[in-house]
Amino acid sequence: MSQWQLENRRFHVDINATGGELVRIWDRQQNVERLWRATSGIWNNSATQLFPVVGRLIHKGLWEGEHFYALPDHGFLRHQTFTCLAQKPDSLLIEAKATLQTLAVWPWQWRIQTALTLHNEGISVSQQVFNDDVRPFWFSLGWHPGFSIPITRSGWQVEFANKPVHGPFYTRGRTLAIPEDPPETRRFPLTADGFTSGAVYFGHCQEQRVIVRSPEGRIALTLDTGQQTWLALWGVPGCDLLCIEPLSGTTDDPDFSGEVTRKRGMQSLAPGECQHFETRVCFAVDE
């Protein structure tokens, strides 16, 4: 099967086998598509999964000692084929794992299980990383969903409800430098030129509730980051697209050496161990 469908009373959802990518969230109650539909020339994805790296790699890969691993930006998971482990009308458990192609560029045995579960307010996405190798490996994991929100109308903003976060940190040439004494904020206005230079990052975002609020002050969407430390916001100027990305790492620092242990946000996973991340998205009933 190349695609799976989930349904409950309110939502109809489509998930592609390629990348385990969520590609549709149709809100039947509100008669509106909640997810960005892939559009050539703007952004040709909807909700990509990122592994084993996040963001741009300025050296086109990573070094581990004397060994260089040539990796694409955002990693290779978004190109892998997922298989179904279990499915119910409103939930799905799928899995991808190491292949000959991935072992050629990243020589570890890994598995990722992604669980998608519909609820009355939206969807939960759970990602679990397994180390099936005899050696530890370093990784970052992320989810890069884009939402269809009319942010070209002025006055939209993103709020951090639970506590102040570090940021905003603006990318330059898809690289990210973090100051030694970072600012803190609880809100970020979505302006016409806010993403002209690329994604905007925020740190210390674990267990955070992210709120997207309309110009009239109504909540359009909430996203709970779970265990992810970083959050990126991104859009294409002039488009009603807002990506809200819970991440365990970031795009490269402009002065990054290329050594895997020094890439921001990379985590070590021991043989036989697994690590779990979960994000919950809720959509307003009446915006």
Image (cartoon, rainbow, N blue to C red):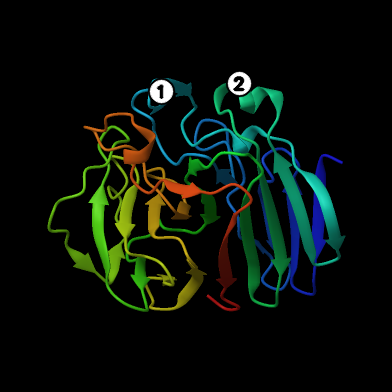
Amino acid type of disc 1? Lys
Q: Which residue is mark 2?
A: 104
Q: Give the percent coordinates (x, y) of residue 286.
A: 57, 78
Label 1 neighbour load within 10 Å: few <14, some 14-19, many 20+: few
Q: Are marks 2 and 1 in contact (CB under 8 Å)?
A: no
Q: Residue at x 35, y 71 (%)?
A: 159
Quarter of the image where the N terminus is located: top right
Q: Nearer the viewer, residue 239 or 147?
A: 147
Q: Nearer the viewer, residue 3 or 286?
A: 3
Q: Earlier in the sequence, mark 2 or mark 1?
A: 1
Q: Give the percent coordinates (x, y) of residue 264.
A: 33, 45
Q: Farthest residue to the front: give it.
A: 134
Amino acid type of disc 2? Ala
Q: Residue at x 29, y 64 (%)?
A: 188
Residue 163 to residue 183: above or below: below
Check disc 2 and report its element: helix, strand or loop: helix
Q: Residue at x 36, y 66 (%)?
A: 158
Mark 2 → mark 1, Cα distance in angstroms: 15 Å
Residue 60 got which mark? 1
Q: Nearer the viewer, residue 212 or 134?
A: 134
